[in-house]
Image (cartoon, rainbow, N blue to C red):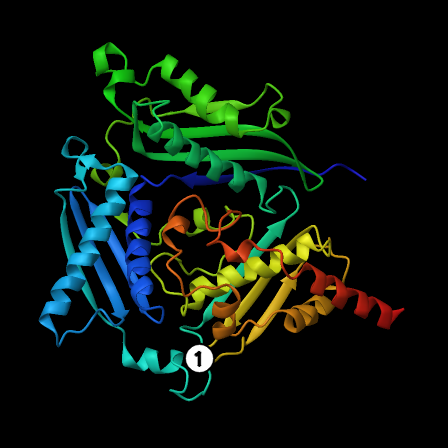
Amino acid sequence: MSTRRMIFTSESVNEGHPDKVCDRISDAVLDLLIGQDPMSRVACETAVTTDYVLIMGEVTCKAYDPEKPKDMKRFKADVERVAREAIADIGYTSADIGFDAKTCQIDIRLHPQSPDISQGVTEGQGLHAEQGAGDQGMMFGYASDETPNLMPMPIDLAQRLAKRLTDVRKDGTLPWLRPDGKSQVSVEYEDGKPIRVVNVVISTQHDTSVCTDGGKGDFSDDARAQIIEHVVKPIIPAAMLDGSATYHINPTGRFVVGGPHGDSGVTGRKIIVDTYGGMGRHGGGAFSGKDPSKVDRSAAYATRWVAKNIVAAGLAKRCEVQVAYAIGVAQPVSINVNTFDTGTVDDGDLTKIIREVFDLRPAAILRALELRRPVFAPTSAYGHFGREGDGFTWERTDRVGELRAAAEKIAGASA
């Protein structure tokens, strides 16, 4: 049997990328409102350009009451405050780079959620008694045993490189870095297993101190060497580098103008970066700025939880789970699982096991994953999956025992 080889590439962007600035602001607003009122309904979108922020969308929460002008003034002041805090934390604090948290103009255009949608999501209203899904659609979750956190290696490395760019900027290791940046990693696979990193791409915003010709020229070779030494080598395992990897560090030659001044940004434009880097399928819905009644977010988290537990239980080496909903209806209209011929249990039987072990109704997901908490701002950069921390409840492998028991029961019945 011939050896099957392929190269797969995934990219990431760091928190200073214009789209990620928007994701961060939207999730900061969500955390503000859900922290005040856990039952808040939020669909907050953000757009940014040179020294300008537009925050728009729909909210229903205790803090928002158009009939109370004083409350509305406080509401808008709080939204503006958390937006400026988010921008400053990312590192945009100077008008010299075209975006300053202290002075940028912020427009807030938020209004109440449609009552027609609300009645389908609120328990006891609409055509069904239970809390229904906030929208129709399909969501996918994915897990693979190729990394310790059960993520595909290309996106896992790309996310960590993007995070490392931010870390060495903020801790002063490379003080000439600016907030915007991107990473990309190409991994060669042999018979489904990652064997080496083939290409690494880093594009990072910088000041002119590391440019040739007194700051007027291109990014210097010495600065490239520093990126490889302080960013790439600490992240890419030495065992995955055989000496033949190609590095493209600021391949345009110069990246001084960046962030919202260099490109406009919009919430939800990095959905593949946010998930599995293209290795698993995507249902199309973005996450940031959406409260967890929106299944675009909560069910995508839940399907990652399901897929990760299946792989952690040893029932498959790779697993992709799809769930789909109708707006206002609690029970999923379909559940599908694909283990890509790596499963120890038939995929059809595994679907039955999922229904037995996991309750994927929206209200049940919110309870199981503790999603009515202000835990979303940390998800806005470096991926929503494969992460650690109290807020990333969907990364728990707490159903492994139940899955194994259910699989053993099926195996015993068919023996």
- Residue 7 visible to an observer of this rendering: yes
Residue type, label 1: Gln
The picture places residue 407, in percent across and down from the top left corner, at 76, 65
Residue found at x 29% / y 45%: 21
Residue found at x 58% / y 40%: 153
Left or right, 82 with reference to 240 = left
In which quadrant is the N terminus drawn?
top right
Please state which of residues 375 and 306 is positioned toward the viewer in this rendering.
Answer: 375
- Residue 264 visible to an observer of this rendering: no
Q: SS of the residue at dot 1? A: loop
Residue found at x 18% / y 39%: 99
The picture places residue 105, in percent across and down from the top left corner, at 12, 48
Left or right, 170 with reference to 338 = left
| Count of residue discs | 1
User: In the figure, 186 relative to 394: above or below?
Assistant: above
User: In the figure, 201 relative to 4: above or below?
Assistant: above
The residue where tag 1 is placed is 131
Left or right, 123 with reference to 64 = right
Q: Farthest residue in the left direction?
A: 69
Please state which of residues 287 and 216 is positioned toward the viewer in this rendering.
Answer: 287
Please state which of residues 390 and 314 is positioned toward the viewer in this rendering.
Answer: 390
